[in-house]
Image (tube, grey):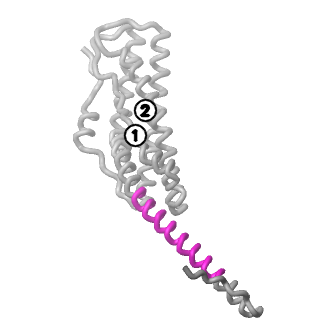
């Protein structure tokens, strides 16, 4: 096998030409590598965007439901408040139904967590990434409120059922729990509206609450006797 040894440069010009050739080769190789990497991340971002949009729209359905029934929930809490006031006067309830009014269900954030772990999110355009970050930050707040609401309405549901007596301290606790439920309802609706607007900022159309769900919630009333 013949081995061609590199020839030594015989002049400064030949030396500079060889250096320039090597440098150009290195730059071309680096450019190609960067182009391949950029294509890889562009493809990863495109797939991640579609998956995150599906997750966001799924969560938006619950947010749209909360906004749609906000007035009915206010009315429901006013009915519970009136019931507590009546019990404070009489010392006991009659047969009661319909107090328990928790609307909570889970949010999906697994896709966002997976894309963050895969370091794909850092390659999104900055404005889009910041919009998504704010959206998911508010979702994390609402996850906590879901759990708290469940506990509150579990406490208030003690009013449901057959006639029973309540002490002054019992009624004080129930009023405190109802006040917290009202505060959470306000926060829920505020954050839900913000997130639905963020969804539009991402170029998506948020879903509407199903009429059947709205009717089911709004037709419910606290009933006595």
User: In the rendering, at what x and y percent does residue 88 appear?
Assistant: 42, 12
Sequence order check, earlier mark of 1 and 2:
1
User: What is the secondary structure assignment of the residue under circle 1?
Assistant: loop
Q: Residue 157 versus residue 1: which sits nearer the camera?
A: 1
In the image, residue 47 sits, relative to residue 106, either above or below, namely below
The answer for how far apart the CA atoms under marks 1 and 2 are is 10 Å
Tell me the quarter of the image containing the C terminus: top left
- By secondary structure, the bulk of the magenta-drawn segment is best described as helix
Report the residue at 41% width, 62% height from top: 46
Residue positioned most to the front: 1
10 sits left or right of 121 in the view: right
Label 2, residues with CA under 10 Å away: few <14, some 14-19, many ≥20: some
Which quadrant of the structure image shows residue 160?
A: top left
Q: Quadrant of the N terminus?
A: bottom right
Q: How many marks?
A: 2
Marks 1, 2: nearer the viewer: 1
Q: Residue 39: say if magenta.
A: yes
Magenta stretch contains residue 64: no
Left or right, 171 with respect to 97, comes to right
State yes or no: discs 1 and 2 in contact (Cβ < 8 Å). yes
Q: Secondary structure at mark 2?
A: helix
Image coordinates for residue 59, horizontal then vertical, percent: 37, 45
Q: Which residue is mark 1?
A: 107
The extreme left residue here reads 212
Residue 90 sits above or below residue 211 on the image: above
* The one of 219 and 13 positioned closer to us in this rendering: 13
Q: Is residue 42 above or below residue 113?
A: below
Q: Nearer the viewer, residue 106 or 65?
A: 106
Locate residue 155, reporting x and y percent: 41, 18
Residues rendered magenta in the picture: 22-49
Looking at the picture, tell me which residue is in the foreground, 98 or 200: 200
**Mark 2 — residue?**
146
């Amino acid at each position: 096998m013949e081995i061609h040894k590199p020839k030594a440069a015989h002049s400064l010009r030949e030396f500079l030409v060889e250096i320039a050739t090597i440098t150009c080769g290195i730059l071309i190789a680096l450019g190609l590598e960067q182009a391949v990497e950029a294509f890889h991340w562009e493809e990863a971002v495109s797939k991640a965007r579609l998956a995150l949009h599906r997750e966001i729209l799924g969560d938006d359905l619950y947010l749209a439901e909360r906004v749609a029934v906000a007035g009915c929930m206010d009315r429901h809490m006013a009915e519970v408040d009136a019931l507590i006031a009546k019990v404070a006067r009489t010392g006991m309830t009659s047969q009661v139904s319909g107090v328990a009014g928790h609307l909570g269900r889970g949010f999906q954030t697994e896709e966002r967590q997976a894309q963050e772990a895969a370091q794909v999110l850092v390659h999104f355009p900055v404005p889009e990434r910041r919009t998504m970050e704010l959206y998911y930050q508010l979702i994390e707040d609402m996850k906590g409120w879901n759990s708290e609401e469940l506990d509150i309405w579990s406490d208030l549901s003690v009013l449901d059922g057959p006639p029973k007596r309540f002490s002054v301290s019992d009624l004080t606790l129930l009023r405190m729990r109802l006040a917290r439920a009202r505060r959470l309802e306000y926060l829920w609706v505020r954050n839900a509206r913000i997130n639905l607007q963020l969804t539009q900022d991402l170029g998506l159309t948020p879903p509407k609450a199903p009429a059947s769900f709205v009717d089911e919630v709004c037709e419910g009333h606290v009933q006595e006797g």
